[in-house]
Image (tube, helix red, strand yellow):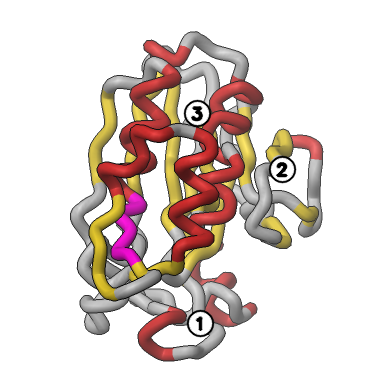
Amino acid sequence: MTTRSFGDLGSETARRKLRARLPADPCWLRQVHGVGVIDASRYAGPVDADAAFARARNVVCAVMAADCMPVLLADERGEAVGVAHAGWRGLSGGVIEATVAAMALPAQRLLAWLGPAIGPAAYEVGDEVRDAFLKIDAKATAAFAANRPGHWLLDLYAVAKQRLGALGVKRVCGGGFCTASDAARFYSYRREKAPERMAAAIWLAE
């Protein structure tokens, strides 16, 4: 699980510490809160995208987050892995669906893990965010709880599980974290208004 043990993964010092635990340099992304997916084996430097996948061994797919949700995917047969940076914009836009599609494997073979994100008791959003989800799927209503006029508490984990289930990904674990309320383990942009980031990484081992 991602923690603060390496420090801010937006810094080169922390990335060097992390690299010592990995089989190769991660394919770092310039995340734009979109739905772009890249094959991490084809890029050596940063590229504009919010998700990556790999079929080759020891190719490290990684995303950074500090309230947005990292979604890690693995094929039960070890043919591919993927990771998506799923804030509300990417999640409503279909970044999970785009990542699963790019992996080009039967969804029933995939396992998903939902990494630390801002929790449903802390993530207040406006009507425009709720509307963006409901335009795609009315069932997303269940992920929103009224908080005050024009504002809602959003459960990112619930939406992700709903989207994954609709794709056929039934084995989903993780969730239940709250980056905003757990300052001892997680960075949180909403709590600290600071640039520090955590990283979530996945790869196929030899």
* Residue designated by label 3: 206
* Residue designated by label 2: 36
Decide whether residue 154 is among the magenta residues.
Answer: yes
- Amino acid marked by disc 3: Glu
* Residue designated by label 1: 196
Q: Nearer the viewer, residue 13 or 172?
A: 172
Which secondary structure lies at badge 1? loop
* Mark 2 to mark 3 CA distance (whole Å): 27 Å
Q: Nearer the viewer, residue 76 or 128?
A: 128
Label 3: how many residues lie within 10 Å, few (<14), some (14-19) or many (20+)? few
- Amino acid marked by disc 1: Glu
115 up-or-down from 128: above or below: above
Residue ID at (28%, 32%) = 172
- Which stretch appears magenta? 152-156
Marked residue nearer the N-terminal end (1 or 3)? 1
Residue 173 point in image, percent of width and height: 24, 37
Quadrant the N terminus occupies: bottom left
Residue 20 in sight: no
